[in-house]
Image (cartoon, grey):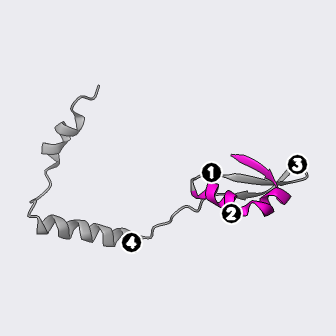
Amino acid sequence: MREIGAFEAKNRLGYLLDLVEQGEEVIITRHGKPVARLAPLKEVRGGAEARAALQRIRQRARARKLGPFDWLEWKPLRDEGRS
């Protein structure tokens, strides 16, 4: 996390936004005291978007005629090599 003074932040806003886009947080200070924080936005996905994605996955599986998912068949493959 970087700290930067308010005057410098004003002059370098584009650079700070680039840092935030890359996932870094920036604290803006005034007279050495933190007054603001620039942080990346967290994407919030709604239930409708998740349901639509699940529907697309199911449609693709039907189109490829993959058949039902057998957990008992796949579980040993997942656990292979685990201690």
Residue 29, placed above or below residue 53: above
* Comparing labels 3 and 4, the label whose residue is closer to the camera: 3
Q: Which mark is residue 14?
A: 2
Q: Which mark is residue 24?
A: 1
**Spatial CA span between label 2 and label 3:** 22 Å
**Spatial CA span between label 4 and label 2:** 32 Å
Q: Determine which residue is flagged by label 4.
A: 49
Give residue 62's position: percent from left, percent from top.
13, 67
Q: Determine which residue is flagged by label 3.
A: 32
Q: On the picture, is 61 further left or further right than 40?
A: left
Which amino acid lies under the numbered mark 2 shown in the image of this protein? Gly
Answer yes or no: do the residues labelled 2 and 3 have beta carbons within 8 Å? no
* Comparing labels 1 and 2, the label whose residue is closer to the camera: 2
**Spatial CA span between label 1 and label 2:** 14 Å
Residue 5, placed above or below residue 78: below
Give residue 77's position: percent from left, percent from top.
18, 38
Residue positioned 11% across, 58% down in the render: 68
Q: On the picture, is 67 further left or further right than 25?
A: left
**Spatial CA span between label 1 and label 3:** 20 Å
Answer yes or no: do the residues labelled 1 and 2 have beta carbons within 8 Å? no
Say what secondary structure mark 4 lies in. Answer: helix
Residue 79, placed above or below residue 62: above
Toward the viewer: 50 or 21? 21
Q: Residues within 10 Å of mark 4 (few under 14, many from 20)?
A: few
Q: Tell me the magenta residue range.
A: 1-21
Q: Residues within 10 Å of mark 2 (few under 14, many from 20)?
A: few
* Comparing labels 1 and 4, the label whose residue is closer to the camera: 1
Q: Main secondary structure of the magenta part?
A: helix
